[in-house]
Image (cartoon, rainbow, N blue to C red):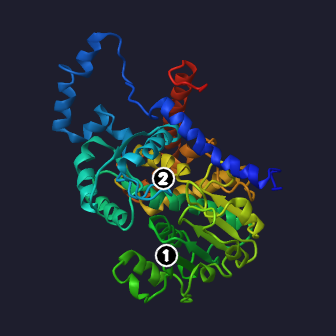
Amino acid sequence: MTENNLSEKELLEAAQKPSKEALRLHPIYKGKIEVVPKCRIRDMNDFAIWYTPGVAAPCREIYENPEKVYEYTSKGNTIAIVSDGSRVLGLGDIGPMAGLPVMEGKAILFKYLGGVDAIPICINAESSDDIIKFVNMIEPTYGGINLEDIKSPRCFKVLDTLRQKSNIPVWHDDQQGTAAVTLAGLINAVKIVNKPLDKIKIGMLGAGAANQRIAIMLAKAGVNPELTYMCDLDGLIYKGREDLAGDPYRTHLAEITNAEMRKGGPEVAFEGVDVMIALSAPGPETVKPEWIKSMAKDPIVFVCANPVPEIWPWEAKKAGARIVATGRSDFPNQVNNSLGFPGIFRGTLDVKATTITDEMCIAAARELAKVAEDKGIREDYLIPTMDEWNVFPREAVAVGQMAIKQGIAQHKLTSEQAFETAQTVIKRARSEMEMRQKEGFVKVDV
């Protein structure tokens, strides 16, 4: 029996239930989002205000002063979730149509948790340049862009180019969002095992977009990159590895990590390390128990592949892990982007930041960790859960204040003003959802 008094068979059945329910419920709702007007419509006369002839007046105002688009339209609170479906969850390159359910799910999380209106846009794109051109073309409509589920190295070029060229914030959630939430969990995990952040050794399984950005952000947050050991499909990354020559991103990581020049596979990468961070192929047998057994005392194991972690949490515990985190909401310690992107974008939009920096993400991570610490961290509670709604306005404040500090905010708010703004918008979004369910516009008992 496991620590929560369920057998491994019962735990496995519970872990498989969300997939079964998803197949049952998706056809009932036929999609997860719809467009609902937020302006008054008392009778047909109001359309003369919202459409022709009245709408010409705000059009002229925006033409004369483009900044008024934020005053007269929904642009300031609307973002696009852009994906080519080339790297979806743990499913791989399944294309834009098959990726659409994920993007719709992301949109409802943006709205319910952060009060952000998000529109999923899945596109047929043959190259990085296709995505870049598309985003540039739709920029007038949106206040920000969330890049999602784009394979590497394509995603790196897309993000780097758009951050330079765009006048609105563009970020890649699989990179920055994953890194922020992972950092938050790690900050509190090392406190529990009483190990300093700048002294820990970290083994990383997977060298895709997520783990590459995690390594960079952890270094900026105080982790010593020389004590980080990253494995890709060909083994440990180290300085001078010949096959990395054409990959500038992994070459950079080879320069700053693995000072010991360890060579070999995962069994070498995890030997004696304090922390395992795996964002690789879905499990449940991707991570071997013996790798965990070879780690240092009180191993911290983050196995965050979706939809199935690289090893089941109970198997990791059996192998000796003291703390286990996954990307799933049905297990303790969910290290998932859903705790990051709603609050980070809320704070970004509220101060009209021109970009989302790593420092803004680190500020969000530290606030996430602080919210959990205020409540009392423990081995099965490293960071807040999604139902602790107050984390999102607090995160928004941290992000917005960092943007102001960095001089990239076009609208300055005090911490108190920022909290009130974020709280009001998020409360409204949650209240609207509750009202629609209560009135029967959204079926609950299905």
Within 10 angstroms of label 2, few (less than 14), some, or many (20 or more) residues?
Answer: many
* Residue denoted by label 2: 399
**Residue 142 drawn at (x, y percent):** 31, 43
Q: Is residue 82 visible?
A: no
Are dots 2 and 1 in contact, CB under 8 Å?
A: no
Q: Quadrant of the N terminus?
A: bottom right
Mark 2 or 1, closer to the camera:
1
* Residue denoted by label 1: 233
Within 10 angstroms of label 1, few (less than 14), some, or many (20 or more) residues?
Answer: few
Q: Residue at x 69, y 48 (%)?
A: 13
Could you tell me which secondary element the residue under label 1 belongs to?
loop
- The three-letter code of the residue at mark 1 reads Leu
Q: How many marks?
A: 2
Q: Quadrant of the C terminus?
A: top right
**Residue 190 drawn at (x, y percent):** 68, 68
Q: Nearer the viewer, residue 319 or 365?
A: 319
Q: Residue at x 72, y 49 (%)?
A: 375
**Is the residue 111 above or below the residue 310 in the image?**
above
- The three-letter code of the residue at mark 2 reads Val
**Is the residue 101 above or below the residue 277 in the image?**
above
